[in-house]
Image: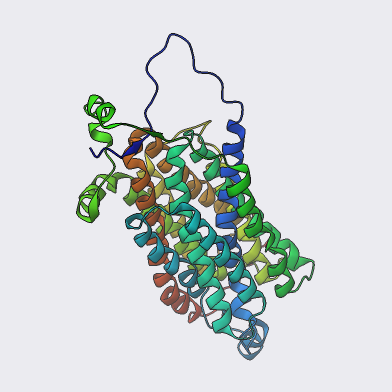
Amino acid sequence: MSGNQEVIVASPVSPHPPPKDRKLWRDLTAYWMLGLCNNYGYVVMLSAAHDIIAQFQDETVDDNTTEDENARKCHLVSTGAILLADILPSLFVKMVIPFLPFWVHFKILLAILLSASGFLLVGFATAEWMALLGVVITSASSGIGEPTFLSYSSHFNKNVVSTWSSGTGGAGVIGSLSYASLRALQVSPRDTMLIMLIFPALEAFSFWVVLRKPTIIPLTKSALESTEELVADDKPLRGFKEKLVYIKTLWPYMLPLALVYFFEYFINQGLFELVYFENSTLSQASQYRWFNVDYQIGVFISRSSVNLYKIKKIWLMAVFQFINVAYFLTEAIYFYTPTIWITLVVVLWEGLLGGGAYVNTFYRMSKEITPGRRRFAMAMVTQSDAYGIALAGFLAIPLHNAICSLPAAHRTVVW
């Protein structure tokens, strides 16, 4: 071990319990708000996908149905295109971040600036490419923030991982609900995006004001040598090759999470838009937005549940999510569900599975991986959901086109 290495070392066993940390609430609260702000823009862009596409298309859904009563009500471009713009930049950033120096303050400042820029670009877009560029920039912001915050959590109480996860779940509910509500109140897309600039500002406040600075203990060479056996498996990973070799130990965390998110977003961006109830009081666009709200409520509930109920078998959640794919695929083709309420229940269940897989994966890592390697491990595993989401986006586009080419299906009962 090098003489200038810094590690966090647990205090020796003492007959007296450690003093209660009365300011722990600051770290827990900060991480909840950071999870909220980091994922908020990502969620809003997915909730707005239907509208972002529609505002730059000359033909409306109603025009299409007027021309051909047997045609399905489909946009020319799948919301999967928005998903790809919303996830690919994030995935690329997440692949690079673990191998870069850990300049936490610079990374967070960059994430905040990109988040604000994304809202402004989408709000003031006059062409489809400008709106998509805004989505790309927002995605990059989220991609920088998630691995950075989760890596930084290794310096704090382990429960900040659960509050972070709860905050990201809160972003889903607050993001989708705020967007759907503002649009229902006839607030323009530009004004909606300007209102949402409050979240990058809140992210800066949470990180630099509310969150405490971690205490890192520098050790002398003699002290390090005396504790070398105790921390042999806790040595920080050095060099690109050593990190690559370590990645194979993370597959039990990465693969189940990637599968859950692949099935989940295959539904959300490939099939949600194609499932609609013709005689509902809500328009097709409104149904899409409220499906997203319902889904995010499920995500929020499950991401906030880890301190109450812990799940180890993430593989089982992937199986259940695959069953949900089968339901939504057949529903999008045949329109056999008699009432929208049944679909809303399935959407809620889908969100519960996705959020549960996320929070239980990272909570297990905070318990099972030693602090010295946890920072790199957290940053790497954040990629796994992005791989699943990206693959879902690519497959959602041809699936969307294939279903749209089918004759329209009609329901006989809605309520």
Q: Residue at x 68, y 63 (%)?
A: 196
Residue 282 seen in this snapshot: no
Answer left or right for 87 relative to 39.
Answer: left
Colour setup of the view? rainbow
Measured from the top left, where is residue 5 in percent x and y?
Answer: 31, 39
> Camera-side residue: 343 or 101?
101
In the rendered image, the quadrant that contains the C terminus is bottom right
Measured from the top left, where is residue 161 in percent x and y?
Answer: 49, 40
* Vertical relation: 8 (above or below) 401: above
Residue 85 seen in this snapshot: yes
Q: Residue at x 35, y 62 (%)?
A: 96
Answer left or right for 97 relative to 137.
Answer: left
User: Looking at the image, how many numbered discs can be counted on the residues?
Assistant: 0
In the rendered image, the quadrant that contains the N terminus is top left
> Camera-side residue: 236 or 199?
236
Measured from the top left, where is residue 245 in percent x and y?
Answer: 20, 50
Which residue lies most toward the top here?
Answer: 15
* Vertical relation: 151 (above or below) 129: above
Answer left or right for 236 relative to 25.
Answer: left
> Camera-side residue: 236 or 255?
236
Measured from the top left, where is residue 249 in percent x and y?
Answer: 25, 44
Q: Residue at x 50, y 54 (%)?
A: 105
Q: Residue at x 26, y 50 (%)?
A: 247
Q: Quadrant of residue 182?
A: bottom right
